[in-house]
Amino acid sequence: MIGLKPQNFYGVEEKRMLNKVFNRKIFSDFLGNYHPKFYGGKYVREFEMKLAKYYKMKYAITFNSWTSGLIAAVGALDINPGDEIIVPTWTMTACPTAILFWGAKPIFADINENDFNIDPLSIEKKITSKTKAIMIVDIHGTPANYKELIKIKKKYNLKIIIDAAQAPGSKYKNKYTVNYGDIGGYSFNRHKHIQTGEGGVCLTNDKKIAMKAMLIRNHGEGVLNTTRRFKKMPMVGFNFRMTELEAAMGIAQLPKLKKIVNEKYKIANQLTRGLSKFKYIKTLQEKKDYDYSYYMYPMIFDCNKIGKKRDQIVKDLKKLKIECRGGFYNLHKLPLYKYTSLFLSRKYPTSFKKKTIQQKCLVAEKLHKENFISFQLCSFSYTKKDVQKILSGFEKLWKNYGITN
């Protein structure tokens, strides 16, 4: 570590809002049946109203986690067993697992090394007659290639789910990325730009999709005791409800979001300017018409020219008290997803080795294994002084490696 302080999320505003909840003595105000309280308590509804207004969407549905939100998002699109949803391999396991949850199959697409997001060219290679949706993930706070993704959506008549968990301020053409999906949302867990402890929100402009998500959140089978009230609504639901305490925290946090995103952006720009003088490091090149949130700061190292393995570089940086992370995810390599077809059919062989279902994502595999390193911007409160310490550490390390700039 370089003396980084953990991100300080809480202050007097949060304490004031939490005290309001304690004074009311109502910590959750949902009822799981057809009743006005089906929609939640005072602060849940207030937080949802503020989120919908902030993101310029008609409906906001909060959840006890973004994982729950993803499950609801998939279910709200009437995804059925046997359907396929294309998802990037570089993301959290909650994304493909939410697809499996409904008996559908996650199909992994490769990423583009320029932005680390799902590659539109890879998507088109994966589309079949069973493809119903694409799950876009704005990884690291970097918006995906919406210019091309919107074309694919229209060309193949697909639904779009947007996981912007790490990208609450990211935009394309001055619109929040979530605006381009049929449904999408954000995470509020412990290391996001703003947090409620745990929590998440789905946003949509479609009334039917919003209602379905609400039913999944709150015991839909108990609410819809007649099929005549809603058509094609899921009857299965869960307790995915946000508490009044979490919602109150969110109400206090939301006004801080723009400032926090801007602070992370400034730190990222300082890093980009400083690292530009070091050979063999490629930083994120921002594109016109896109706004960035910088949940993480991503880099690609030309390890062959540096003459060191990526993992050795990470170890050497940590010896200099520079906290960083090597690699990311390759979900298509995990056993659960390698054996997806077997899992869905419940036909388990005695030997998995003979039944392995390979999905290749060559760009993601190379980056994960060989040359990707990142800084966790949202986990710490970086200052300009911290950036200088990082750059000084790189100067020392490059000198030790015999690299002249």
Image: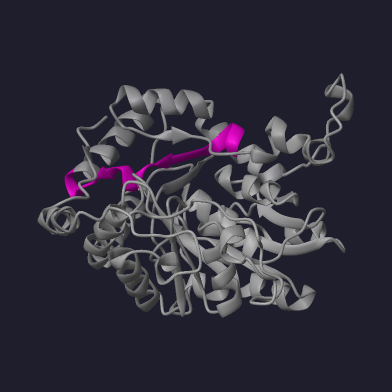
The residue positioned 72% from the left and 43% from the top of the image is 362
Query: Foreground: 87 or 182?
Result: 182
Question: Hey, which quadrant is residue 227 in on the image?
Answer: bottom right
Residue 348 locus on image (x, y percent): 84, 28
The residue positioned 72% from the left and 72% from the top of the image is 152
Query: Foreground: 77 or 396?
Result: 77
Give the quarter of the figure containing the N terminus. Answer: top left
Query: Foreground: 33 or 12?
Result: 33
Residue 300 locus on image (x, y percent): 51, 43
* Magenta region includes residue 14: no
Q: Is residue 276 left or right of residue 259?
A: right
Question: Hey, which quadrant is residue 169 in on the image?
Answer: bottom left
Residue 371 locus on image (x, y percent): 55, 37
Highlighted range, magenta = 368-385
Residue 105 appears in the rendering: yes
Work out whether 336 lies above or below 39: above
